[in-house]
Image: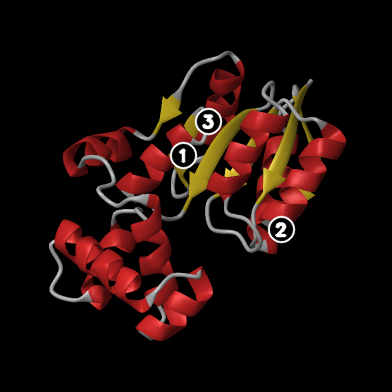
Amino acid sequence: MIRILLAEDQGMMRGALALLLGLEDDFEVVAQAGDGLAALAEARRTRPDVAVLDIEMPGRSGLDVAADLRRELPGCRVLIVTTFGRPGYLRRAMEAGARGFLVKDGPIEDLVTAIRRVLAGEQVVDPALATAALSVGPNPLTDRERDVLTAAADGATVADVAGLLHLSESTVRNYLSSAIGKTGARNRIEAVGTARQNGWL
């Protein structure tokens, strides 16, 4: 049996996926989780063969959980599924150790096939997303620039961001200015929008 962990924050979607995957003779959904922290705890408890992770979850994102699983359970294959087909997400997922990346609007048969393929050691990537990722190029932002943009995303002041990240206000301004330049934006709001659209945050 292929033992599967399913992590998805929308309960109805998670239940439907578990039901559909459970119809396969060789699949067993051994654990379900509604957030990233629970997904990691369930993975440690059940040691699944494949973890199917949504990207955007409370607690820890699917990308964070993928990186955790690569360190803690290297035998567990990770397959990312997302509503958001953003090119930067694909790159970050692969860097985090994911073996597959699918957009949720595909048929369930694609997910079933992808689970079998990643377990066999293959990489499975949505073809349209792979093309988009190549055209966009790598994430131009440093980790610190991403941190500052993320902290500033909801209208926080420079002072707020400085306090949150334990940086000086001038350092925050420098990071914001650099991020604005790298994203080709006119201001930090545009920079956040561009970075989010490309999956860089």
C-alpha separation, residue under disc 2 versus residue under disc 1: 19 Å
- Mark 3 highlights which residue? 97
Q: x and y percent of residue 132 in the render?
A: 23, 41
Which is more toward the observer, 186 or 38?
A: 186
Q: Earlier in the sequence, mark 2 or mark 1?
A: 2
- Mark 1 highlights which residue? 93
Label drawn at residue 186? none
Local SS, label 1: helix
Horizontally, is 28 left or right of 82 in the view?
right
Identity of the residue drawn at 51% across and 27% down: 99
Q: x and y percent of residue 110 in the render?
A: 49, 33
Which of discs 2 and 1 lies nearer the camera? The answer is 1
C-alpha separation, residue under disc 2 versus residue under disc 3: 21 Å
Query: Residue 124: which quarter of the image?
Result: top left
Which is more toward the observer, 3 or 158?
A: 158
Amino acid at dot 2: Gly
